[in-house]
Amino acid sequence: DAKTTQPNSMESNEEEPVHLPCNHSTISGTDYIHWYRQLPSQGPEYVIHGLTSNVNNRMASLAIAEDRKSSTLILHRATLRDAAVYYCILGGAGSYQLTFGKGTKLSVIP
Amino acid sequence: DTEVTQTPKHLVMGMTNKKSLKCEQHMGHRAMYWYKQKAKKPPELMFVYSYEKLSINESVPSRFSPECPNSSLLNLHLHALQPEDSALYLCASSRGGVIHPNTEAFFGQGTRLTVV
């Protein structure tokens, strides 16, 4: 499976934008980039996914580098409820099984 | 209904007990997953079912036995577990089976298992 690398932890002030990076230099052409988050004492929750183009939804934006070797999850205005572990995961056709890496623990400071 | 429901929420069992974890979804999803999560660690994939057939077994010990009786239900049968098997067991589902990566997975809240 292609691997991802994320910082162990990040901090953000409440109501400010947050950029969570992910490196995936061995990504294949058919791998989608998925982001999930896990709030304390809950199951993981889907955030966003994309293949080549940048993606926006009500929760976040996903910016994908032109060479697809890295991506950035953008939370436009962090709230206390966004404090969670964020996982960047690659999923490819025929092997969509969501293998989680260590993720980034995001702390939001009031 | 976009929920994956897991029961029970908490389970304490002895090493000689037999118990089962249950997972249910009514979203028409054809892929269902079992994950194990130890404290402060990421979820680890255990099993994947695609169209009710076991597609992936990540070398899980035989004391864990999955079952997919129909497209909405996934069970995990537990027998002769060890204390180190204590963990949060998460179920997830996604549409279309494992051949469709352009989709999202929905996770349940998990069953907190303690083996004594």
Image (cartoon, coloured by chain):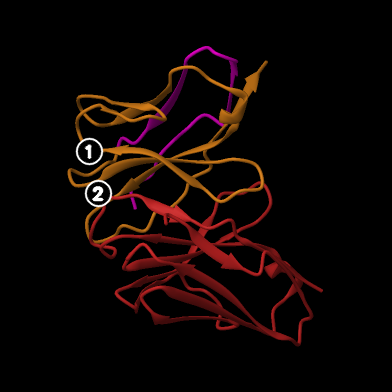
Along the viewing direction, whichever of A42 and A28 lies nearer the viewer: A42
Are tags 2 and 1 found on a single chain?
no
Q: Is residue B70 left or right of residue B8?
A: left
For disc 2, the neighbor class at 10 Å (few under 14, some 14 to 19, many from 20) is: some
Q: Is residue A29 left or right of residue B5?
A: left
> In the image, what residue occupies the spot 22% across and 56% down?
A93
SS at badge 2: loop
Chain in orange colour: A
> In the image, what residue occupies the spot 60% across and 60% down?
B110
| Chain hosting mark 1 | A
How far across and how far down the image is residue B52, in percent? Answer: 34, 78
The span picked out in magenta is A1-25
Q: Amino acid at mark 1?
A: Leu
| Chain hosting mark 2 | B
Mark in the foreground, 2 or 1: 2
Q: Amino acid at mark 2?
A: Asn
Identify the mark at residue A24; answer none if there is no mark. none
Q: Is residue A2 magenta?
A: yes
Chain B rendering hue: red
> In the image, what residue occupies the spot 32% across and 29% down?
A70
Along the viewing direction, whichever of B70 and A23 lies nearer the viewer: B70
- Residue A79 falls in which quadrant of the image? top right
For disc 1, the neighbor class at 10 Å (few under 14, some 14 to 19, many from 20) is: some
The residue that mark 1 highlights is A51
- Cα distance in 3D space between marks 2 and 1: 8 Å
In the rendered image, the vertical position of residue A93 relative to residue A80, given as above or below? below
The residue that mark 2 highlights is B102
